[in-house]
Image (tube, grey):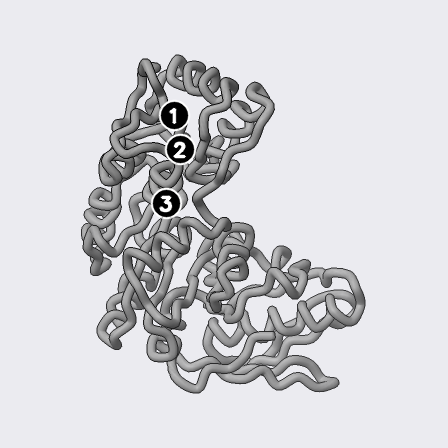
Amino acid sequence: MLPPAEQPLDQTYDLAVLDLDGVVYVGEHAVPGAVEGLRSARSHGLHLAFITNNASRPPGQVAEHLRELGVPADEGDVVTSAQAAARLVAEQVPPGSQVYVIGGAGLHEALEEHGLEPAVTIPERPAAVIQGYGPDMPWRQVIDGAILVKEGLPWVASNMDLTVPTPRGAGPGNGALVNLVAEYAGRRPQVAGKPERPLFEETATRVGGRRPLVVGDRIDTDIDGAHHMGWDSLLVMTGVTTLETLASLAPESRPTYVGADLGCLALPVPAVDADESGCHVGGWTATVDGGRLRVKGEGDRHDWWRAAAAALWTHLDAAGQAADPGDAVEPR
């Protein structure tokens, strides 16, 4: 549980496999500290791979957005679920096949990269159906694709995320529409995106790296995906995960490391010293008293989260029930 790292993480690993939304940016804006953290990590020799379940934008557009925010990124550093999904399709159909697309431009570009022909009207001999997030696709495109799926064609979904971030809050994601097609067709697709293996395998194929570290803000996609690959992981607390989430995490779902933000990549990870008085990390002491989390002391934000997580998990493993985070608040 939360092992130490004597060297900074950006020197312990040779590749950071980074989630984007909630880790590097939120919408059009960089997460505080992300740009500085990634620039520092790259200057220390850590290779950065940016992976996303969102299949709507091609890698070039994602890389351009990152550069606009000040993050060093080339097109080849970005790997999308559309690319992983297209490879799954290409492994099952003859070269040059027509593939029906339920989704956006990212899927078209990914299919063409494999010599396949994307189609949005039903071709004479469709070989497969590929489905991913496409905010502007017409309903007819969904209907025609669903009919082909029901007829039994190979069907690959880019991901199963039930929500997608929007300026007005979380909206229905690709998984919601995939479930609709699945209910109609009476079958389930192959899935390429996190937490399944294909997107991580695509990243290893395209970017390389002998010792990767998965960095994300979500347990169900980023951290579970790392577990599926047998890779170490870093959970950063800049996205959707909360103390309540940490309090109920079973051992098989826990990250290797926890940090406040991407700034922790430049730092070594101190050991957790646990005894009867609590879990001690870098000047913080966290305990669960009367079922409620309490954190006292002083130090940096990364160690605060490590102490809190260690205390919550120690309590969960011993008591069999999650502690109440109470009024514990991360220092600013």
Q: Looking at the image, is 61 positioned above or below residue 17?
A: above
The location of residue 96, given as percent across then percent down, is: 25, 30
* Any part of residue 326 in sight: no
Q: Could you tell me how far apart the alpha carbons at marks 3 and 1 are, in whole angstroms?
A: 16 Å
Q: Nearer the viewer, mark 3 or mark 1?
A: 3
The disc label shown at residue 132, or none: 2
- Label 3 sits on what residue type? Ala
Quadrant including the C terminus: bottom left
Can you give x and y, in whole percent of width and height, for residue 272 in the image? 58, 82
Q: Which mark is residue 102?
A: 1
Left-right relation of 213 to 188: left
In terms of image quadrants, where is residue 213? bottom left
- Please tell me which residue lies in front, 90 or 144: 90
Pointers 1 and 2 in contact (CB under 8 A)? yes
User: Amino acid under label 1?
Assistant: Ile
Q: Quadrant of residue 164?
A: top left
Q: Is residue 201 above or below residue 132?
A: below
Of the numbered discs 3 and 1, the one sitting upstream in the chain is 3
Q: Of marks 1 and 2, which one's residue comes earlier in the chain?
A: 1
Alpha carbon distance from label 1 to label 2:
6 Å
> Which numbered marker is on residue 179?
none
Residue found 46% across the figure and 76% down from its top: 300
The N terminus lies in quadrant: bottom right
Badge 3 vs badge 1, beta-carbon distance below 8 Å: no
Q: Where 62 falls versus 39 (above or below)?
A: above
Q: What residue did someone put label 3 on?
A: 84
Q: Position of residue 280 (x, y in %)?
A: 60, 83
Extreme residue in the front direction:
94
